Amino acid sequence: MKVLKFGGTSVGSVESILTLKRIVEQEAKQQEVIVVVSALGGITDKLIATSQIAVKGNEEWEAEYEAIAQRHHDMIDVIISNANRKQELLQKVDALLEQLRSIYRGVFLIHDLSEKTQAAIVSYGERLSSNIVATLIDGGMRMNARDFIKTERKNGKQSLDAELTYKLVRKAFGSISCNDVAAKGMVFVVPGFISKDRDSGETTNLGRGGSDYTASIIAAALDAEILEIWTDVDGFM
């Protein structure tokens, strides 16, 4: 098993996301693959900035929200050619975008942006991108990270509940046997960064850079052969 994590730049443009598709599908011919994806490049910052506009009672949040929605629609229009798959994906994406709009409107109306609400807002970046990638990749199957990445409140902040998380990761992926005919050629796509509070059930996150953390957690829990962190930049450091 191999775990591949793709950052925002790797899903930030049409060229990059199609490269992701080629890489993953080639790897999937050789072994079971789990793909962890970040939000489309720049979207997390855009989500945060829009929430800051909304909480001030500034109606400009609507234009910023529409730009976020259009960015995802434009990507889908270009990269998904199958009409049925595109329609199914758009239904999922539009449902998520409508939820996001409702949250922003609430923030705008009451001029309040709690930690809980901010965590919910930023989660939409990965929720949207993972649906797009799972549809794009042949054999892609989206997994809900909130089902198995669990946090707990410690010293006023959210921390990973490693023991529970490892147990749930093994259960989630172990329930789909790679020896099962139906699972052959399947690629598991997981939204990075997102988690859920084990006690309250509220959406939480693993902090900036959390998608790398998600991939590392999954790779360690499943004793993966290798974890690769892919990015789309010139040169290396």
Image (spheres, rainbow, N blue to C red):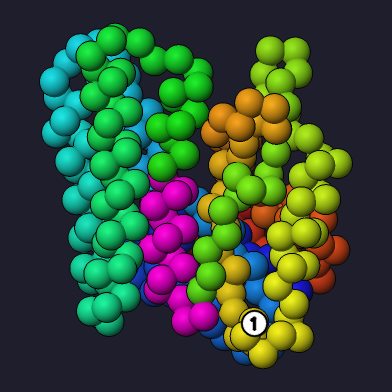
For badge 1, the amino acid type reads: Ala
Q: In which quarter of the image is residue 92?
A: bottom left
Query: Residue 109 at x, y = what percent?
Result: 23, 14
Q: Residue at x 20, y 26 (%)?
A: 61
Q: How many labels does the image show?
A: 1
Instruction: Identify the residue position indicated by label 1 in the image.
Output: 183
- Local SS, label 1: helix
Looking at the picture, does residue 57 appear above or below residue 81? above
Relative side of 44 to 97, left or right: right
Query: Residue 192 at x, y = what percent?
Result: 57, 49
Q: Give the range drawn in magenta.
A: 125-139
Q: Which residue is drawn at 52% across and 80% down?
A: 139
Crowd class of label 1 (few under 14; some 14 to 19; many from 20; radius 10 Å):
some
Q: Which residue is drawn at 64% across and 48% down?
A: 147
Query: Residue 70 at x, y = what percent?
Result: 19, 50
Looking at the picture, does residue 87 appear above or below residue 166? below
Query: Residue 3 at x, y = what percent?
Result: 69, 66
Relative side of 207 to 61, left or right: right
Please say whether residue 138 is one of the residues in the magenta stretch: yes
Q: Main secondary structure of the magenta part?
A: helix
Q: Which residue is drawn at 28% across and 20% down?
A: 106
Residue 18 appears in the picture as rendered: yes
Relative side of 225 to 34, left or right: right
Looking at the picture, does residue 68 appear above or below residue 108? below
Residue 53 appears in the picture as rendered: no
Looking at the picture, does residue 42 appear above or below residue 190? above
